[in-house]
Image (cartoon, grey):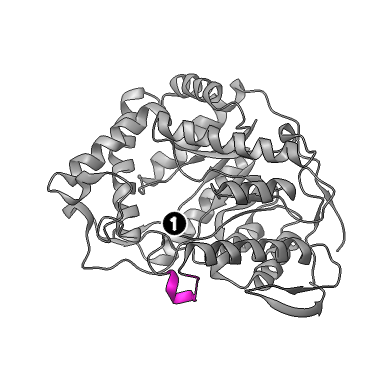
Amino acid sequence: MKFGTVLISHWDGDLVPAQVYQRMLDRIVLAEALGYYSVYTTEHHFANDPEYLPFNWDKARFKAYDLAPDPITLLSFAAARTSKIRLGTGVILINYDNPLRLAERAAMLDVLSGGRLELGIGRGAGQPHSGAFGCPAGEVEGQERYREALEIIVRAWSGERFEFHGKHFNFGPLQLVPTPLQRPYLNSDKTGVPLYTSTGNPENLAEAAAQSISHITVTGAWGDSGIEKYNQRQATFAEACGANGMDPAGHLYPGQLFQFVAPSDAEAEDMAEEYIAKYLAHVEAHYQRQRRGSSVLGAHLGSEDGIEHVRELARQSVATNLVGSPKTVAEKLAAFLEKIPSINYLSGIADAGSPPPAFVDRSLELFAREVVPHFTKLREPQLETTGA
């Protein structure tokens, strides 16, 4: 079993961006010292609308959901301060970029870090300002661009000279330099860093399986319905693997849960209820789903009791995430893995909602020292490196 951590660079309160980055980088160094297998960061863009404060939240102004518009830059800086921990994107938005530019930057990070990059990819659908990057507005066009971009990245990382002629990208023969240091994929003989897609689209999952690209889940657990959706996605992926003559058991399947670990259940639960609610306010301040009439969190968000609805969601999430004392969290994790047996790579979202730094750091330590030892490790991925 692999255990990583996910860090979100929320910008709120009285901090300035430099302080947000420094706190995150210090935490990455701590995670490496504690033996975490990986650290993942996210990609989001632009400051929040200062005139929109979800649910009339009165504790702090939510300046920006995330200060990581380019995860490659952030992880490159982290690579210089670490030597072992793997560096992942959960996820990078390939429709927001030229796939050749992304392939170049990702390959550079892999080389500079000594072969530690893991690239989680997604489309970026649902972000309110995607039009600023010239992203396709329609579902069909967005899917087409996503698939072309993924094919270009995989072919570019091969190190071979190639050309591409598609609907959205068209270029003559070229060769990417440098190529990634890691060879091969986790579970195939293709060249490139470990790739994970966050898509739930059955066609995209089937295409990913055909290329030996696994899938990643990038949110906490919101109850049995979320578990059911995950298992349906895994069944689709496993079926596609079988159709392509590959063993689905050979892949890693990263999943993410909120992580609030404290010496007592009471302390962990109190912190989780407060800061997961704040996290949900951060989400709404950024995505503006309720404001745009497309909320996925429930009809109550538009009413006066919206904040109470968010707090109730936070209370419910305590039961299905890594919340509690180390003993309780170990028991919850064992039960969770029984419900989703395919997950073999779990990352805790350690700082959702910006809890006090001392709490987050202690939570990371308690989980690493008192929970992880209860779980047997899977085989280490067979990653080779070259001098490319």
**For the point 76% across and 39% down, which residue is it?**
381
Query: Where's residue 210, x and y in %?
Result: 73, 48
Q: Amino acid at mark 1?
A: Ser
Residue at point 45% right, 52% down? 8
Q: Nearer the viewer, residue 7 or 288?
A: 288
Please rate how many residues cluster around mark 1, counting C-alpha atoms within 10 Å: few if below 14, some from 14 to 19, many from 20.
Answer: many
Picture coordinates of residue 126, whole percent (x, y): 41, 59
| Residue sitting at the far left | 304
Find residue 341 and report its image quarter: top right
- The image position of residue 294, as x and y in percent, is 31, 55
326 displayed left or right of 82: left
Q: Quadrant of residue 308?
A: top left
Horizontally, residue 174 falls left or right of residue 198, namely: right
Q: Can residue 328 be found in the magenta stretch? A: no
**Residue 197 seen from this side:** yes
* Residue 259 in the image, given as x and y percentages of width and height: 45, 36
State the residue in front, 114 or 255. 255
Q: The C terminus appears in which quarter of the rendering? A: bottom right
Q: Nearer the viewer, residue 34 or 333?
A: 333
**Residue 262 seen:** no
Secondary element under disc 1, as helix, strand or loop, is loop
Image side of residue 357 versus residue 305, left or right: right
First to last magenta residue range:
130-136
Magenta stretch: includes residue 133: yes
The residue under label 1 is 9
Give the position of the N terminus as an image quadrant: top right
Q: Is residue 370 left or right of residue 253?
A: left
Q: Residue furthest bottom?
A: 172
Find residue 363 and report its image quarter.
top left
